[in-house]
Amino acid sequence: MATYRNQSGLTLVELLVSIVIVAVAASAVLAVLATTSGSSADPMIRRQATSIAEAYLEEILLKPFADPDGVDGESSRAAFDDVDDYDGLVDAGARDQFGNAIPILGAYTVSVNVGSSTALTGVPAADTLRIDVNVTWEANIDFTVSAYRTRL
């Protein structure tokens, strides 16, 4: 009677199936890594946009409600002396409070809109200003922060 020994090893079909499985798994992992690395800078850019908007808003809110010198509509940001002077301000690239460009933040665009508001109950519209600071970065980031300033 003939005796057979157990054979160990892989057949060609088993080897090909295992290669296909490993290739599919590796491509899925690489696709996830590519997506993650492609958008990894977004949180930093969003945080910078938030910081820029908050800095502009703080600068505006520190100004008086009414014009202190009686001359409205100063022409440069360094001369702005009340809240409504900022209405219509558009800075291509973030700038400091004196209007000087900050080179590393040049890709951001900041726009400010100031107008009267009736949103605050019990406060007349003539005594309320709504300030909207919008910061954009290319097509990915569009961030707006708002606040109210009252004469009271």
Image (cartoon, grey):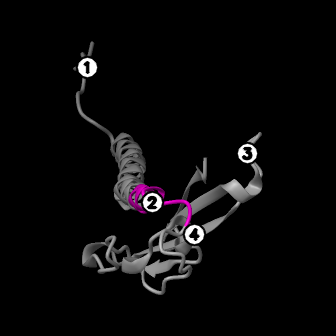
Residue at left offset 41%, top offset 43%: 21
Of the two numbered discs 2 and 3 in the rendering, the one whose residue sits closer to the viewer = 3
Q: State the residue in front, 124 or 115.
A: 124
Q: State the residue in front, 91 or 122.
A: 122
**Is there a contact, CB below 8 Å, between mark 1 and mark 2?**
no
- Which residue in the protein does label 4 denote? 84
Callout 4: SS: helix
Of the two numbered discs 1 and 4 in the rendering, the one whose residue sits closer to the viewer = 4
- Which residue in the protein does label 1 denote? 4
Q: State the residue in front, 50 or 4.
A: 50
Q: Alpha-carbon distance for marks 1 and 4?
A: 96 Å
Question: Is 63 on the left-hand or right-hand side of 96?
Answer: right
- Main secondary structure of the magenta stretch: helix
Q: Alpha-carbon distance for marks 1 and 3?
A: 98 Å
Checking the image for residue 53, the label placed there is 2
Disc 2 marks which amino acid?
Answer: Ala
- Which residue in the protein does label 3 denote? 123
Q: Position of residue 146 (x, y in %)?
A: 58, 54
Tell me which segment is drawn in magenta: 53-66
Question: Sequence order check: which comes first, mark 1 or mark 2?
Answer: 1
Question: Sequence order check: which comes first, mark 1 or mark 4?
Answer: 1
Of the two numbered discs 1 and 2 in the rendering, the one whose residue sits closer to the viewer = 2
Q: Residue most toward the top?
A: 1
**Is there a contact, CB below 8 Å, between mark 4 and mark 3?**
no
Q: Residue most toward the front?
A: 69
Callout 2: SS: helix
Disc 3 marks which amino acid?
Answer: Val
Residue at left offset 76%, top offset 40%: 121
How packed mark 2 is, by other alpha carbons closer than 10 Å (few <14, some 14-19, many 20 or more), is: many
Above/below status of 85 relative to 56? below
